[in-house]
Amino acid sequence: METKDCNGTLLQDGDNVKTTKDLKVKGTGMTIKRGTVVKGIRLTNNSDEIDCRVQKTKIVLRTEFVQKQ
């Protein structure tokens, strides 16, 4: 299974990505701003999602909203 970012670049565990748009996080009052760098991502069983930590909060991001750095 291949996990790709919004540009079609392959992602691997431990990669650094940045967000391509402002994202509101459900269940919290947090908004992840466009251009926020997320370090050390982890791939999931779903090729459209990645696990990561942003501002000490563990979240799942859709790969369509991230770009590999």
Image (cartoon, grey):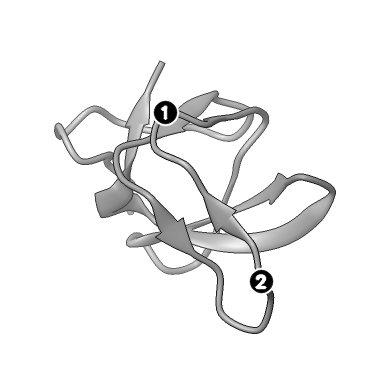
| Residue that sits furthest to the front in the current view | 29
- Where is residue 14 shown, x and y percent of the image? 63, 28
At 37% across and 24% down in the image, what residue appears?
68
For disc 2, the neighbor class at 10 Å (few under 14, some 14 to 19, many from 20) is: few
> Do we see residue 66 in this rendering?
yes
At 34% across and 51% down in the image, what residue appears?
63
From the image, which quarter does the N terminus lie in?
Answer: bottom left
- What is the three-letter code of the residue carrying label 2? Gly
User: In the rendered image, which quarter is residue 58 located in?
Assistant: bottom right
| Mark earlier in primary sequence (1, 2) | 2
Q: Secondary structure at mark 2?
A: loop
Is the C-beta separation of discs 1 and 2 under 8 Å? no
Mark 2 lies on residue: 29
- Where is residue 10 shown, x and y percent of the image? 30, 31
In the foreground, 25 or 12: 25
> Do we see residue 2 in this rendering?
no
Q: Which mark is residue 23?
A: none
| Residue that sits furthest to the top in the current view | 69
Q: Is residue 1 left or right of residue 40?
A: left
From the image, which quarter does the C terminus lie in?
Answer: top left
| Residue that sits furthest to the left in the current view | 7
User: In the rendered image, which quarter is residue 7 located in?
Assistant: top left
Mark 1 lies on residue: 35
On screen, residue 33 above or below 69: below
Q: CA distance from mark 1 to mark 2?
A: 19 Å
